[in-house]
Image: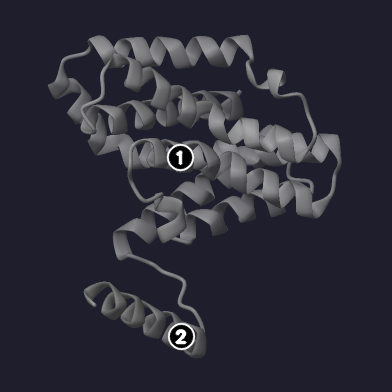
Amino acid sequence: MSWIVLHIIGIIAYTASGALVAIESKYSFIGIFVLGLTTSFGGAIVRNLIIDAPVSGVWESNTMAIVFVTLTLLVFLPLKWVHHWKRWGLFLDSIGLATFALQGALSAKYAHDHLGLILLSAMFTGLGGGMIRDILAGRKPLALKEEVHAVLTLICGLCTWMGWIHPIQLTLVVFCIVTIRMFAVKFNWKLHLPYCLEKRFRNNDVKAESSLKK
């Protein structure tokens, strides 16, 4: 039961995050629905393509109902209530990251039980919707700038591959992922590249800037 509740919270959080990005970009209510649906289902569509499952299987009726109710409420809620969501948005979005990644990993495990597919499915289900949302909003995808997000989805995939599929175990994984992400945001944790690679990327950035100035 706890896993189901957390997954519902994750769906609501991801849907709301897409809607909030649309509101910040001053999109119409059509844009709010498009970005909300994209964030909720974009990663699942990519996942089904990876594991060779029918894309139509993404449109599960209960999930669709949750998404549409959430988006409808956000369209009609006063803006001050919507902005109040931002205080809890990061925490709820972290639940969405974990539950979506686990859901993607479980789908791959039941379909193929191949480590590589499980990890890819977890990563793209957890991050895919948000990346597509940011592109539609004209923003740089956060997942491509902060590698912690991708690492956390891979941890979800690894736990699933190891057999952590009981609801209690899944709930524990969500708790750990949310805790790690909140600490990562609070203390600005980053994964540093080896010195030689970091220096190479820095030099490339300098060359690119100088060429633009010319």
Q: Mark 1 or mark 2, which is nearer the start of the sequence?
A: 1
Question: Disc 2 vs disc 1: which is toward the camera?
Answer: 2
**Which residue does the image show at 38% across and 82% down from the upper left?**
202
Asked which quadrant contains residue 70, the reply is top left
Can you give x and y, in whole percent of width and height, for residue 134 in the image? 39, 41
Q: Position of residue 126 (x, y in %)?
A: 55, 42
Give the residue pinned by disc 2: 200
Q: Count every numbered label the image shows and give the total.
A: 2
The x, y position of residue 165, in whole percent, is 74, 39
Observer able to see residue 159: no
Q: Give the left or right position of residue 185, taking residue 180 as reference.
A: left
Q: Residue at x 64, y 40 (%)?
A: 102
Q: Nearer the viewer, residue 163 or 134?
A: 134
User: Looking at the picture, which amino acid does disc 1 mark?
Assistant: Gly
- Viewer-nearest residue: 108 or 186: 108
Residue at the extreme bottom of the image, as rendered: 196
Left or right of 129? Residue 212 is left
Q: What secondary structure is marked by label 2?
A: helix
Residue occupying image coordinates x 36% and y 51%? 140
Q: Quadrant of residue 185?
A: bottom left
161 left or right of 30 in image: right
User: With respect to residue 191, does 91 lie above or below?
Assistant: above
Which residue matches tag 1? 130
